[in-house]
Image (cartoon, rainbow, N blue to C red):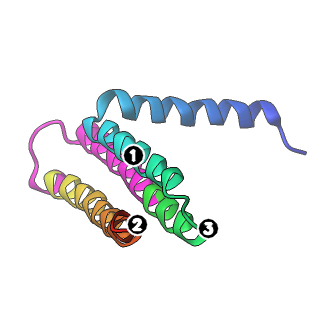
Amino acid sequence: MIDFRKFIKSMSFAIQGIVSMFITENNARIHLLATTVAVAAGFYFHLSSNEWLWILLAIALVWILEAVNTAIESLVDLVSPDFNPLAGKAKDIAAGAVLIASIFAIIVGIIIFIPKLSL
């Protein structure tokens, strides 16, 4: 049997984590702006189902990796409050993953939206 109280409680913790990410991470607010622009453009240009799938995949990938990056940064700061080259490397690699996803999202956006702008 599913315990809905535990489910609701775990969902509230997840939402608290997302809110915390928005409060503490400037890049999360930038991603929110980019997400808003992409979704608004998608509605404006009446994207096809396949185009929406690519846009939503790109958006989700960036958000997932931003959340993982934020979690890694917080954990590294907890266990290594003083500078440590390995801690810095872990944070840089996590940030690099977000950068790769963001570049992918930009490329997807270019492929989908640029032809629509030239019509």
**Considering the numbered disc 3 on the image, is that residue within a helix, a strand or a loop?**
helix
Q: Which mark is residue 6?
A: none
Asked where in the image residue 105 lies, by quadrant, the reply is bottom left
Q: Which residues are magenta?
A: 61-87
Quickly name the residue at label 1.
37
| Principal secondary structure, stretch drawn in magenta | helix
Is residue 5 highlighted in magenta? no
Marked residue nearer the N-terminal end (2 or 1): 1
Q: Is residue 76 left or right of residue 1?
A: left
Distance CA(mark 3)–CA(mark 2): 15 Å
Is residue 71 highlighted in magenta? yes
Q: Residues within 10 Å of mark 2 (few under 14, many from 20)?
A: few
Q: Is residue 80 left or right of residue 53?
A: left
Quickly name the residue at label 2.
116
The residue depicted at 52 percent of the width and 68 percent of the height is 51
**Three-letter amino acid code at disc 1?**
Val
